[in-house]
């Protein structure tokens, strides 16, 4: 589980840096500066807990699985964003967006979260050759 937490945290950071650098590209800023926050590492790392869902959902289409993951990510983003916002530590603020809910989630990001969820699913379902112990201590 610890390995998956770090893998998901690092992957999330990289995806966020890529995503935010596309905004620089759109603005024709050729430095392509992407950014993230240290707070995002544990938030992305929590997607390691998707693993049991990945196994249950494997018989469904990628669109349905992606929609499910998107909902889980929205829930995680809402909870973590609300907590961080309460202490004035939230690294994102979507207040100006039309589809924002309390400034901590943007519903128009659902397709991006669907893709991210499927990427995390792929990472979490790779076979390592070792027996699965992810649910052993529950």
Image (cartoon, rainbow, N blue to C red):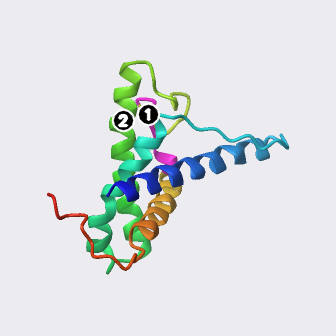
Q: Is residue 47 magenta?
A: no
Residue 52 lies, in percent from the top left, at 26, 66
Q: Are marks 1 and 2 in contact (CB under 8 Å)?
A: no
Residue annotated with mark 1: 104
| Mark 1 closeness class: few <14, some 14–19, many ≥20 residues within 10 Å | many
Compare residues 34 and 138 and report the one nearer the observer.
138
Residue for point 44% across, 18% down: 88
Compare residues 10 and 60 and report the one nearer the observer.
10
Q: CA distance from mark 1 to mark 2?
A: 9 Å
- Tell me the magenta residue range: 102-109
Residue for point 82% across, 41% down: 31
- Left or right: residue 53 versus residue 99 is left
Residue annotated with mark 2: 80
Q: Is residue 108 magenta?
A: yes
Q: Quadrant of the N terminus?
A: bottom left
Q: Nearer the viewer, mark 1 or mark 2?
A: 2
Residue 94 appears anywhere in the view: yes
């Amino acid at each position: 589980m610890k390995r998956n937490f770090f893998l998901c945290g690092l992957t999330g950071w990289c995806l966020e840096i890529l995503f935010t650098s596309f905004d620089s590209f759109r603005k024709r800023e050729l430095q392509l500066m992407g950014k993230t926050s240290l707070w995002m590492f544990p938030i992305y790392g929590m997607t390691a807990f998707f693993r049991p869902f990945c196994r249950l959902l494997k018989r469904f289409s990628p669109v349905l699985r992606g929609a499910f993951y998107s909902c889980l990510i929205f829930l995680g983003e809402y909870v973590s964003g609300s907590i961080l916002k309460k202490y004035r530590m939230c690294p994102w603020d979507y207040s100006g967006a039309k589809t924002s809910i309390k400034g901590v989630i943007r519903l128009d990001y659902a397709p991006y979260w669907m893709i991210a969820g499927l990427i995390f699913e792929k990472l979490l379902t790779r076979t390592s050759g070792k027996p699965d112990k992810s649910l052993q201590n529950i």
